[in-house]
Image (cartoon, grey):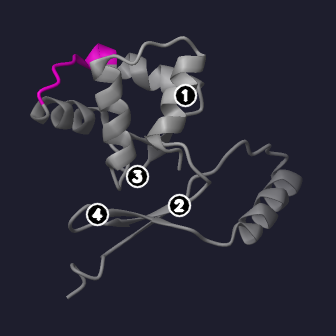
Amino acid sequence: MKDTENIFAILRAKKMRLTKTRFAFVTLLSESPTPLSVSDILSILQTKGIVVDKTTVYREIERFIALGILEEVSLGDRKKYYELASEHHHHLICLECNRVEDIDIDESTLVQQEMKVNREKKFQILKHSLEFFGLCNKCCV
């Protein structure tokens, strides 16, 4: 995961001002252990006293994705979530408490499956997303 100083360096290199809102946005994303929705971002920024509208958040998300700082994540509920760009990983999602945890798995098997799909279905895979849904150890009683 990119640390905040690396992100700030990218923004400076692109001549983007480090406004109070942008600073809070970067800090929030870097401190969050889980992907965040736009409503999560707005709510957390508001509790920190940062007044920002939804349009500004969406605009920043688009800029950060274009710069390779942020990634969009789908967690199976048709909402879009965002997290700092990092090495490719997957998620464990608890259906009871909604806790989301990163998980690293051996990608070699997935790569083989992608090649098989490409060959058999003539389908060019550009990316994939894999989430595991179940109950975490706190909810599995």
How far from the left and from the top, in percent, is residue 24?
Answer: 29, 30
Residue 54 forms part of the magenta stretch? yes
Q: Nearer the viewer, residue 57 or 47?
A: 47
Q: Nearer the viewer, residue 29 or 130?
A: 29
SS at mark 1?
A: helix
Residue picked out by circle 3: 76
Q: Earlier in the sequence, mark 1 or mark 2?
A: 1
Q: Are marks 4 and 1 in contact (CB under 8 Å)?
A: no
Q: Earlier in the sequence, mark 4 or mark 3?
A: 3
Residue picked out by circle 4: 99
Compared with 113, 127 (above or below) is above
> Residue sitting at 28 percent across and 66 percent down?
95
Q: Are marks 2 and 3 in contact (CB under 8 Å)?
A: no
Q: Nearer the viewer, residue 31 or 135?
A: 31
Amino acid type at circle 3 is: Gly
> Residue 9: which numbered mark, if any?
1
SS at mark 4?
A: loop
Q: Earlier in the sequence, mark 2 or mark 3?
A: 3
Give the alpha-carbon distance from disc 1 to disc 2, as whole Å. 27 Å
Residue picked out by circle 2: 90
> Residue 125: which numbered mark, if any?
none
How far from the left and from the top, in percent, is residue 105?
Answer: 61, 71
Q: Earlier in the sequence, mark 2 or mark 4?
A: 2
